[in-house]
Image (cartoon, rainbow, N blue to C red):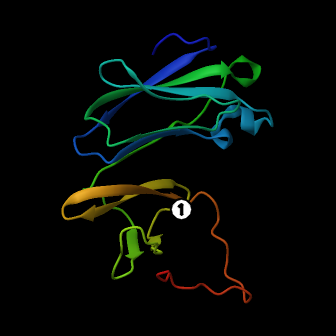
Amino acid sequence: CKAGGGVGVTALNVTVPAGAQVARFALFDTETSGHASGAADDLDLLVLNSAGTTVGTSGGATANEQVTLMNPAAGTYKVCVIGYAPNNGSATYTLSSWVVSPSDVGGNMKVMLPSTAYTGGTATAGVSWSGLTAGKRYLGALQYVVSGATQGTTLIEVDATDPVPLADGNRVAAAPRAQ
């Protein structure tokens, strides 16, 4: 990793295959040693492509950091965690990473879309995902394709580390509808 002003730097190589829609790298405050002791660690992220060029950075005052690369080129990326100001001079952490490609499968995703869409109009799409392992975070991508050309991509995050709210008698789930 490039030299940076932090207490310590560790790096992880991640291979991104051809055709990947997204690659995401993230740190979470709740997954650091500082969080366990009631203090905050200040960790930052730096991502370099296979040529050694910086392609993404995230550096805030905590360890909640995220770098997302849309349609990344195939290759080996170096993800650097920089200990900018870890609590008591050092930190342990979990680096999360996702690489999403069209061939990925997992869980059961359902999408409800209107039967017709118009340029300049609005509509509602409903997405649900089931069959995922509890205690994990997931990332998926939905691509909008018209006449064979991708018009846009929407990322879908599912956090199965939090308990799902239970339904109560005062709330009723409504099906998505076109507007």
Give above or below for 112 relative to 59: below
Q: Which residue is mark 1?
A: 134
User: Which of 108 and 113 lies nearest the eye of the viewer?
Assistant: 113
Residue sitting at 72 percent across and 89 percent down? 169
Residue sitting at 33 percent across and 80 percent down? 116
Give above or below for 154 relative to 61: below
Residue sitting at 56 percent across and 60 percent down? 160
User: Which of 51 and 143 lies nearest the eye of the viewer?
Assistant: 143
Q: Amino acid at mark 1?
A: Ala
Q: Quadrant of residue 55?
A: top left
Q: Quadrant of residue 15?
A: top left
User: Which of 92 and 54 lies nearest the eye of the viewer?
Assistant: 54
Instruction: Count residues near mark 1 (Cα–Cα under 10 Å), then give few for <14, some for 14-19, many for 20+.
Output: few
Residue 81 point in image, percent of width and height: 54, 25
Residue 126 point in image, percent of width and height: 47, 74
Residue sitting at 35 percent across and 28 percent down? 77
Number of callouts: 1
54 horizontally vs 42: left or right = left
User: Which of 135 and 9 lies nearest the eye of the viewer?
Assistant: 9
